[in-house]
Image (cartoon, helix red, strand yellow):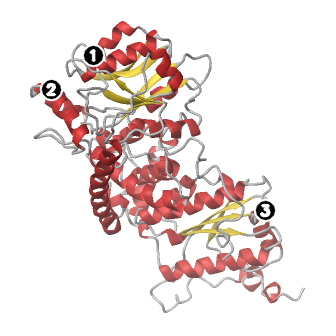
């Protein structure tokens, strides 16, 4: 395999625990730590979760900002699952499912598509930033696409800044 | 068939009671679900099987404390059941159609009787009116003839009614057509030929002003609706839903009175939001402060996601709100925007599938592929 991502040094090799910098060493000069977005991802068991697994077993690097929750189908993502983390201050929510036509349960992803469209319209209408919610079709063979999606989303959210709901107590 | 229910001594109410009574006696239906007046003057729906009790029926009382569609569902949803006539306002008819799609009602043994709606008052306002000397039914019915739907002096219709642009009964089995009618000479009615035959009603080709009056009513109400919508839209854009509904006490009244919010195992009625004491402390520490009761916006946003596509705009959520929040207007504004995406009009047609249970393979093809 000549994929350049595969040749990247795995993190564990780059910095084994025993060689970690000693605690007394001077801290980096920058006083502002870089904002690290938190992404909650709901991935379908058959495609996107397996795609994420492939990214891992292929040692493709992607940002550690994503927290993955495995579901049987993108069609089983109730809007509440997306709303709860958003209102609690998660910076982004990713829903991953099989490409149209490939759903293990025939039509779950088509329903997820309509539900997500409605959800985003309602968020927009309610004055909540709907661009923090992403729906992506990623198949079991698309490990690279999964890594790219997480990278792209992390960069997008880093640019956007923290979810105002992190400090909004009155919701 | 179009016909006319005869009215004697200008007594429209007695004519309607007589008509309902005939439906029972001619065995068109086994019972009727109709608003009734209790001995102390309150108005509540009741299922009436004995025609003698219809002397208490008061379908013209301008009060709406609940939407009767779920009750129509309750008496029709499964067999064994009787054949029931249900007298419903237009918003109740629309809610009933949504409940049929949600499998919470069945039209198989229902005879729907739609009545044009001239506007309704909240229960508290109606009680005040009764204390104030009662409601002038003649003046109220006169507004149907002219199409100038005004509330009695010193009182206001329910919020939902003020912005309701669909007050005319459509698509019922039997329709009592109050708009544009000269009610003292008779109540125009549209009904199936076989029912008319059983009741001994003949075809009457009276000159009807109903379409013109409906046009006038709809135009006036659409104007007030658009005005209210732009006011709410502006507030939502400025404050967000968490600002507009900030005073919510999460009493769930809006959900309880909502005719299309039907789930028997609702998340918000469960123990899901009851946590260990230390959990609240952790959340408070994380944000610095933590609102209690928790998850008020999650409640409204979840409800929006679960039912706003079926929101038929009866406005009972606003009527039921102890904090006097514009819940109904918010839901209607966001509902209209979301319904337009799916070209869906709730309550229009029972054959129209709910947008979230159906799909086309070839739609929104760019979504998910970015």
Q: Nearer the viewer, mark 2 or mark 3?
A: 2
According to the picture, the residue beneath numbered tag 2 turns out to be B130
Q: Nearer the viewer, residue B311 or A164?
A: B311
Q: Quadrant of residue A142?
A: bottom right
Position of residue B370 relative to residue B77, above or below, is below
Image side of residue B213 versus residue A84, left or right:
left
Q: Earlier in the sequence, mark 1 or mark 2?
A: 1
Coordinates of residue A170 in the picture (x, y in percent): 35, 58
**Is residue B72 shown above or below B286?**
above
Circle 1 residue? B38
Chain under disc 3: A
Residue drawn at (74%, 70%) of the image: A138
- Residue B342's quadrant in the figure? bottom right
Above or below, A147 against A130 in this view is: below
Residue A69 appears in view: yes
Q: Are marks 1 and 3 in contact (CB under 8 Å)?
A: no
User: Secondary structure under badge 2?
Assistant: helix
- Residue at 41% x, 8% y: name it: B50
C-alpha separation, residue under disc 1 versus residue under disc 3: 58 Å
Task: Give the residue number, with chain letter if any, for mark 3.
Answer: A101
| Label 1: how many Cα within 10 Å (few below 14, some 14–19, many 20+) | some
Residue plotted at (47% across, 11% down): B26
Please state if A86 lies on the left or on the right of A98 as rendered.
left
Q: Nearer the viewer, residue A84 or A9?
A: A84
- Disc 1 + disc 2, Cβ < 8 Å: no
CA–CA distance between discs 2 and 3? Answer: 62 Å
Give the distance between the C-alpha atoms of the residues marked 1 and 2, in whole angstroms: 14 Å
Residue in front for this viewpoint, B169 or A84:
B169
As helix, strand or loop, the secondary structure at mark 1 comes to loop
Q: On what subunit does the disc labeled 1 rest?
A: B
Q: Which mark, residue B172?
A: none
Q: Is residue B125 visible to the viewer in this orientation of the structure?
A: no
């Amino acid at each position: 395999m000549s994929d350049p991502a595969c040749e990247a040094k795995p993190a564990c090799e780059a910095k084994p625990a025993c060689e970690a910098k000693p605690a007394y060493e001077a801290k980096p000069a920058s006083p502002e730590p870089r904002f690290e977005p938190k992404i909650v991802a709901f991935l379908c068991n058959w495609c996107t979760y397996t795609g994420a697994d492939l990214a891992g077993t292929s040692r493709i690097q992607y940002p550690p900002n994503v927290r993955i929750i495995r579901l049987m189908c993108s069609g089983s993502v109730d809007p509440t699952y997306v709303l709860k983390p958003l209102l609690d201050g998660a910076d982004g929510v990713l829903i991953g499912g099989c490409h149209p036509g490939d759903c293990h349960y025939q039509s779950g992803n088509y329903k997820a598509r309509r539900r997500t469209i409605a959800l985003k319209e309602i968020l927009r209408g309610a004055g909540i930033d709907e661009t923090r919610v992403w729906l992506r079709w990623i198949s079991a063979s698309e490990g690279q696409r999964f890594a790219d999606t997480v990278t792209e989303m992390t960069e997008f959210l880093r640019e956007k800044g923290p979810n105002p709901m992190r400090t909004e107590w009155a919701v | 068939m179009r016909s006319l229910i005869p009215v004697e001594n200008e007594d429209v109410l007695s004519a309607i009671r007589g008509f309902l009574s005939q439906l029972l006696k001619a065995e068109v239906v086994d019972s009727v679900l109709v608003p009734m007046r209790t001995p102390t003057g309150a108005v509540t729906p009741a299922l009436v099987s004995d025609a003698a009790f219809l002397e208490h029926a008061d379908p013209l009382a301008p009060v709406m404390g609940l939407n009767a569609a779920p009750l129509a569902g309750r008496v029709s949803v499964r067999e064994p059941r009787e054949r029931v006539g249900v007298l419903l306002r237009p918003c109740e008819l629309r809610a009933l159609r949504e409940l049929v799609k949600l499998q919470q009602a069945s039209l198989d043994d229902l005879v729907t009787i739609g009545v044009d709606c001239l506007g309704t008052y909240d229960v508290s306002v109606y009680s005040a009116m009764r204390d104030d000397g009662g409601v002038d039914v003649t003046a109220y019915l006169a507004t149907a003839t002219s199409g100038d739907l005004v509330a009695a002096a010193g009182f206001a219709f329910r919020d939902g009614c003020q912005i309701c642009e669909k007050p005319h009964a459509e698509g019922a089995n039997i329709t009592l057509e109050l708009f544009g009618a000269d009610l003292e000479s008779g109540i125009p009615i549209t009904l199936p030929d076989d029912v008319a035959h059983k009741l001994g009603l003949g075809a009457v080709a009276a000159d009807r002003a109903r379409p013109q009056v409906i046009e006038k009513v709809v135009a006036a109400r659409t104007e007030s609706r658009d005005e209210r919508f732009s006011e709410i839209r502006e507030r939502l854009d400025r404050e967000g839903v968490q600002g507009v509904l900030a005073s919510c006490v999460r009493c769930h009244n809006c959900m309880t009175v909502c005719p299309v919010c039907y789930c028997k195992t609702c998340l918000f009625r469960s123990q899901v939001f009851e946590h260990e004491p230390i959990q609240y402390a952790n959340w408070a520490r994380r944000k610095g402060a933590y609102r209690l009761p928790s998850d008020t916006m999650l409640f409204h946003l979840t409800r929006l996601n679960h039912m706003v596509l079926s929101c038929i705009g009866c406005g009972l959520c606003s009527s039921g709100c102890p904090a006097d929040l514009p819940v109904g207007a918010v839901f209607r504004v966001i509902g209209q925007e979301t319904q337009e995406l799916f070209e869906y009009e709730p309550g229009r047609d029972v054959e129209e599938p709910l947008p979230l249970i159906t799909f086309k393979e070839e739609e929104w093809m760019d979504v998910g592929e970015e």
